[in-house]
Amino acid sequence: MTDITTKTCDVAVIGGGPSGLSAAITLKQAGVKSVVVLDREAVAGGIPRHCGHPPFGLAEFKRILTGPEYAKRIVKKAQQEGVEIALKTTVVLLEKQGRLTLVSPDGTSQLLAKRVLLATGTRETPRSARFVSGNRPIGICNTGALQSMVYLKNMVPFRSPLVVGTEIVSFSALMTCKKAGIKPVAMIEQNTRPSVQWPVYYAASFFGVPLRRKTRIVEIIGGNRVESVIIAGGNGKEEKIPCDGVLFTGLFTPESSLARMSHLALDPDTGCPLVDNNGRCSDPVYFAAGNVIFQPVKVAGKCWQSGIRIARAIVDDLSG
Ligand SMILES: Cc1cc2nc3c(=O)[nH]c(=O)nc-3n(C[C@H](O)[C@H](O)[C@H](O)COP(=O)(O)OP(=O)(O)OC[C@H]3O[C@@H](n4cnc5c(N)ncnc54)[C@H](O)[C@@H]3O)c2cc1C
């Protein structure tokens, strides 16, 4: 059996999004010697990397930036402060005493940290967890996947999808569709009212997308790729709509799968790691910040501030 290498550090930050990076910067500025940010992606910056629209950065930089501009700026700031960022590094296991198991292109390794900060963010609910029946063709994704395809990979997964959901992120998805020349066939909301406030939902008609309330998706039909969907209105009447994709938006859940598999306690109502006012988890070596502890989800600026606040609590804790 090969030995697994074990490194050590003062604070390991899991997640290189706004909250993880602001925490890492604050820790370095407070004099914490070794701070390592671990991120599974090839580029740090978190969700804003693929939100190709403004407004980001107003509170942090007093400027209106697009998501990618903001992501670049926060990564640069972290690097300038001497934060070590380990990319393509996925944390797969959390254990007591701050022992983390990591998987990267170099293989499996362990990191022993005096304190660990979970800053793994949030994600939208995928089709599988929404129990939508039907075939399993190509052309079904969430907003995050659509944005990373369009903005980071220059790919277009569909031309005329059905958009499910009317949260703020659903309208961000419509902006991404417009940018990529995608024309959604409709946007559906199963409740009587859209989830966003008036007048935001009028943006659907601005984008030329019919908004249908009291309507839910029943079934997805297709061979290789999506060919149509069955939707049902408030009176239960079903209708077949031709389309070549389905975009499931919103219904955010905390990205807390790591905590779920570990010894850390979770909040039974939200699924977030259970934390006290200082962001400390049930194991005092572990802390959490950003959207992994927020339900409902918060914007990047709030997550940035959350990282700073929890990092200060970690500094106090380390200094006894
Ligand atoms: C699709 C989508 C669109 C959004 N659009 C906007 C928007 O337009 N404006 C806005 O203000 N907010 C938006 N948000 C909210 C967004 O969550 C916040 O803006 C902000 O990015 C949250 O910061 P964070 O640091 O908490 O998490 P994130 O930015 O999500 O960063 C988490 C990081 O953790 C990493 N990670 C997760 N698990 C592991 C692991 N096991 N090992 C290693 N790394 C891991 C991820 O790769 C990621 O880089 C959006 C969210 C989503 C999901």
Image (spheres, rainbow, N blue to C red):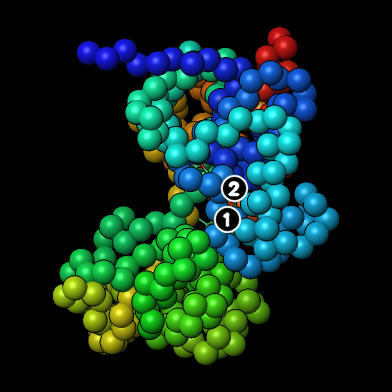
Count the marks. 2
In the depicted structure, whether residue 252 falls above or below residue 265: below
Please state the horizontal and vertical placement of residue 123, each as a whole percent of the image: 46, 52
Disc 2 residue: CB within 8 Å of ligand 1: yes
Q: Are marks 2 and 1 in contact (CB under 8 Å)?
A: yes
Residue at image point 49% right, 86% down: 209
Instruction: In this rendered view, identify the residue nearer to me: 84 or 303.
Output: 84
Marks 2/1: CA–CA distance: 6 Å
Q: Estimate how packed mark 2 is, as few (under 14), some (14 to 19) or many (20 or more) residues with alpha carbons within 10 Å.
A: many
Place of residue 105 in the rendered image (x, y in percent of width and height, measured from the top left): 38, 35
> Which residue is denoted by mark 1 in the rendering?
49
Q: Indicate whether 248 appears above or below 88.
A: below
Identity of the residue drawn at 42% across and 70% down = 155
- Look at 25% across and 76% down and name the residue there: 226
Asked if residue 183 shows in the view, the reply is yes
The image position of residue 131, as x and y in percent, is 26, 60
Q: Amino acid at mark 2?
A: Gly
Q: Is residue 308 left or right of residue 195?
A: right
Q: Nearer the viewer, residue 247 or 41?
A: 41
Residue identified by numbered label 2:
45
- Whether residue 272 sits left or right of residue 216 in the image: it is right
What SS does tag 2 mark?
Answer: loop
Disc 1, ligand 1: is the CB inside 8 Å? yes
Q: Is residue 49 left or right of residue 255?
A: right
Identity of the residue drawn at 63% across and 76% down: 200
Q: Which residue is nearer to you in this view: 246 or 164?
A: 246
